[in-house]
Image: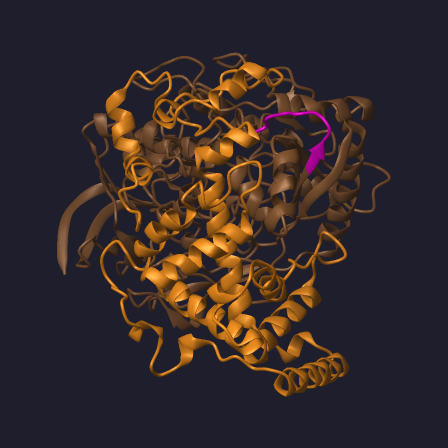
């Protein structure tokens, strides 16, 4: 890395990093659980294989986080879209996600205990939101569109610093969690109704693509789900072949409760 | 190690170069084996366009399905770049392309003569034009001839698709600024043909075309090749080396099959079409006493002159509802800024492609910062209101932008992984600044409320090219105008790596035309006994 810095900038940057590091050290330091010897895998009630990775408490935690990220108001939110089930099935199918979620969920609880002396689920909604706001990092945008090596060098430095001292692992996990929750919620026809989206793109496509949107299209978005995903489909078999995940997911086959 | 029956031609790679080679040579009666590192896909089973959570599944597919984790790792030699986009599988990167089929312009072949930069191609537009035509007919391209930049193109087999509504929104801005737009020629079917249905404008091209309406190589050239009875495609075959005999001719190809067993495929002629990253890697890894610097590398230019189209992609918000998730992702192009123009501080130029912004609610949600009620309100208010455009510039070839073998990192087969060194030159940066200015002007003129996302990520782009460039002089190039190696008479390299300069056109058509031309040459020379 040294060859990308002039000596002066490098010294300046290290001074900042050291200063900031002390600050964090002086405050509160929550170790990332993935690195501990007794690891998150030892937590009771978890099955590492099979379709249900989360134990009851973790499932409730994921559901609470999902409801914070996509709250229910006059329109349905993450709870109505069964986002926790979606994430359960997502995590159960992927090795790297299992690791990230096991460590991340435990981290959120330990962070909450340090800050408020209680588990995350025992906090009231305002406190939960406050805690998430602290973990969430706005994606940084550089001044220009064309980023040069200095932007990347600084980004790398920030990342290293976060990993060493900060809520680094926590923030990275929160980004994964936020994305997964959005994928879960906005991939569910429950949300399409409030947006006026009438996917998925196949098997019928969008033959009206060249004209302005028609109000009649939005009626498609409020149809019953089964009809929605197979509409106008003349090849039943094809749908059965390409919809196994969505079908089992919508039928609640992979849910916990 | 198992030694397989010798064939006439062994083709490495099955994309725009290799797939075309296989069909053309197979039809001429030569026995051909195609070695492809990736898998063979069944669109209806493997692709994600019909899933409820198609956005996440498609995104994951892009990373996992079209890759070969045991061999496709790449390391980066400098900061500020990302790994280039590639796709592995029978059909190569065409599995994920948008099937754009524009030609290079006559000027693109003589950049050195015109502007004093880069290098001239050893062939002219006239040499390649008949092969452009042949491929356009073969791919049943839908387009409208007579555009202002390629006036001499004969009528395309099918009429062009209409602009999508998202394109029409941006078109307002282009019209105000006097920028001419033209429907891009595309290899998507207008009418059912050969067992493939017509395109239904689902817009999922980059995640793999589920209906097979998009003309990727695996549904066009490969089936035709296999129907000749002369071509065998072997998926999941990872090539590591090309061996040579005592006289310096290429003798055979060493590869690992799907079960991890090492095999040798001998052939009279070897065609390397593994793409601009893997082709130089295989050559550099094929060192031997006769070729100490890597096969076909007496010039030292194998792996050098790596280039891409340097581009900026922008997505903007509009007052009116557009529902831009409908239809093909792109559609309209302009080459008004292509080539060197007076009054600009840089040489060569760039092209514009309109696109539709976010493909669906989930991809918009994850790209929008924040969470909670605020985020939900934003989605409720603005979903369906996005459109955008991307502008890609012609990057000048530079020797320092290169693929090398990484001395430290090896893949699962023990082969050194490629290492990319890549930097934007002064000219590229000036061009990018100009592109950014024009993009903002166009979006503003089109009535955009806000530019949501503007992004330039060097290295991440597609259109990798230039690493085994063609030329007349064996001291400064790897292959001649017929893609034939200067050093090894029976070795051909037919893919993006033989590009001399990048032009502004999407490269698939040019790669296919070069491969078709090389196949004709192989057949003619073979008949004469000159190979």
- Residue B58, image x, y percentages: 42, 41
Whether B132 is drawn above or below B392: the answer is above
Query: In the image shown, does B258 or B289 lie closer to the viewer?
Result: B258
- Residue B512, image x, y percentages: 44, 33
Whether A158 is drawn above or below B122: the answer is below
Q: Residue at x 28, y 64 (%)?
A: B413
- Residue A185, image x, y percentages: 47, 43
Q: Which of the image's four quarters has the C terminus of chain B?
A: top left
Q: Residue at x 73, y 47 (%)?
A: B432
- Residue A124, image x, y percentages: 55, 62
Whether B25 is drawn above or below A102: the answer is above
Question: What are the residue bounds of the magenta stretch?
Answer: B316-324
Query: In the image shown, does A169 or B276 lie closer to the viewer?
Result: A169
Q: Residue at x 45, y 67 (%)?
A: A104
Colour assignment, chain B: brown
Q: Which of the image's four quarters has the N terminus of chain B?
A: bottom left
Whether A82 is drawn above or below A163: the answer is above
Q: Main secondary structure of the magenta part?
A: loop
Q: Which chain is orange?
A: A
Q: Is residue B286 left or right of residue B395?
A: left
């Amino acid at each position: 890395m040294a060859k990308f810095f002039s000596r002066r900038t490098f010294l300046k940057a290290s001074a900042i990093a050291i200063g900031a590091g002390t600050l964090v050290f002086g405050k509160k330091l929550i170790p990332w659980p993935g690195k501990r010897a007794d690891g998150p895998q030892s937590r009771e009630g978890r099955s590492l294989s099979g379709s249900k990775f989360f134990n009851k408490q973790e499932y409730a935690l994921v559901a609470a986080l999902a409801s914070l990220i996509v709250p229910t108001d006059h329109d349905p939110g993450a709870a109505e879209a069964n986002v926790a089930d979606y994430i359960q099935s997502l995590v159960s199918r992927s090795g790297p996600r299992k690791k990230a979620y096991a460590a991340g969920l435990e981290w959120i609880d330990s962070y909450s205990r340090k800050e408020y002396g209680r588990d995350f689920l025992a906090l009231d909604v305002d406190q939960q939101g406050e805690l998430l706001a602290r973990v969430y990092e706005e994606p940084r945008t550089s001044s220009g569109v064309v980023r040069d090596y200095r932007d990347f060098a600084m980004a790398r430095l920030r990342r290293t610093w976060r990993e060493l001292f900060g809520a680094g692992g926590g923030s990275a996990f929160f980004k994964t969690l936020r994305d997964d929750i959005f994928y879960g919620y906005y991939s569910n026809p429950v949300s399409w109704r409030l947006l006026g989206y009438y996917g998925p793109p196949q098997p019928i496509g969008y033959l009206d693509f060249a004209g302005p949107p028609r109000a009649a299209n939005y009626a498609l978005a409020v149809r019953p789900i089964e009809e929605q995903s197979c509409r106008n489909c003349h090849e039943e078999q094809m749908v059965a072949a390409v919809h196994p995940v969505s079908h089992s997911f919508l039928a609640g086959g992979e849910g916990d409760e | 190690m198992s030694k397989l029956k010798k064939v006439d031609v062994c083709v490495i790679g099955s994309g725009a170069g290799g797939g075309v080679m296989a069909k053309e040579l197979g039809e001429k009666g030569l026995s051909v084996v195609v070695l492809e590192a990736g898998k063979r896909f069944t669109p209806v089973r493997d692709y994600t366009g019909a899933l409820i959570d198609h956005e996440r599944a498609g995104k994951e597919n892009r990373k996992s399905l079209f890759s070969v984790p045991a061999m496709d790792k790449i390391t980066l030699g400098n900061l500020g770049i990302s790994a280039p986009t590639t796709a592995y599988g029978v059909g190569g990167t065409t599995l994920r392309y948008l099937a754009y089929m524009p030609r290079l312009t006559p000027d693109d072949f003589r950049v050195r003569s015109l502007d004093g930069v880069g290098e001239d191609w050893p062939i002219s537009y006239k040499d390649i034009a008949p092969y452009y035509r042949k491929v356009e007919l073969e791919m049943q391209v839908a387009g409208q001839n007579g555009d202002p930049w390629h006036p001499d193109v004969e009528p395309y087999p099918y009429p062009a698709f209409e602009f999508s509504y998202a394109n029409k929104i941006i078109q307002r801005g282009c019209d105000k600024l006097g920028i001419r737009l033209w429907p891009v020629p595309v290899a998507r079917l207008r009418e059912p043909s050969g067992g493939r249905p017509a395109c239904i404008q689902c817009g999922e091209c980059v995640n793999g075309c589920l209906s097979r309406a998009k003309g990727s190589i695996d549904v066009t050239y490969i089936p035709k090749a296999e129907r000749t009875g002369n071509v065998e495609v072997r998926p999941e075959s990872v090539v590591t080396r090309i061996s040579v005999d005592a006289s310096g001719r290429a003798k055979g190809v060493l590869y690992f099959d799907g079960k991890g067993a090492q095999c040798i495929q001998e052939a009279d002629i070897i065609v390397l079409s593994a793409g601009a990253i893997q082709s130089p890697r295989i050559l550099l890894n094929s060192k031997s006493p006769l070729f100490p610097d890597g096969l076909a590398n007496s010039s030292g230019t194998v792996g050098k002159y790596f280039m891409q189209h340097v581009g900026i992609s922008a997505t903007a918000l509009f007052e009116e509802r557009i529902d831009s998730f409908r239809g093909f992702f792109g559609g309209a192009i302009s080459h008004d800024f292509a080539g060197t123009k007076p009054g600009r501080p840089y040489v060569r130029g760039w092209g514009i492609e309109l696109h539709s912004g976010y493909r669906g609610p989930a991809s918009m949600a994850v790209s929008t910062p924040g969470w909670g009620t605020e985020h939900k309100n934003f989605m409720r208010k603005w979903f369906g209101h996005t459109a955008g455009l991307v502008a890609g510039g012609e990057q000048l070839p530079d020797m320092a932008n290169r693929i090398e073998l990484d001395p430290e990192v090896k893949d699962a087969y023990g082969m050194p992984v490629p290492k990319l060194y890549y930097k934007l030159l002064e000219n590229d940066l000036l061009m990018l600044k100009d592109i950014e200015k024009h993009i903002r002007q166009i979006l503003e003129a089109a009535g955009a409320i806000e530019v949501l996302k503007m992004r330039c990520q060097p290295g991440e782009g597609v259109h990798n090219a230039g690493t085994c460039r063609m030329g007349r002089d064996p001291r400064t190039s790897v292959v001649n105008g017929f893609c034939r190696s200067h050093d090894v008479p029976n070795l051909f390299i037919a893919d993006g790596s033989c590009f001399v300069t990048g032009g502004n056109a999407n490269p698939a058509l040019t790669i296919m035309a070069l491969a078709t031309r090389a196949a004709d040459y192989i057949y003619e020379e073979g008949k004469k006994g000159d190979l």
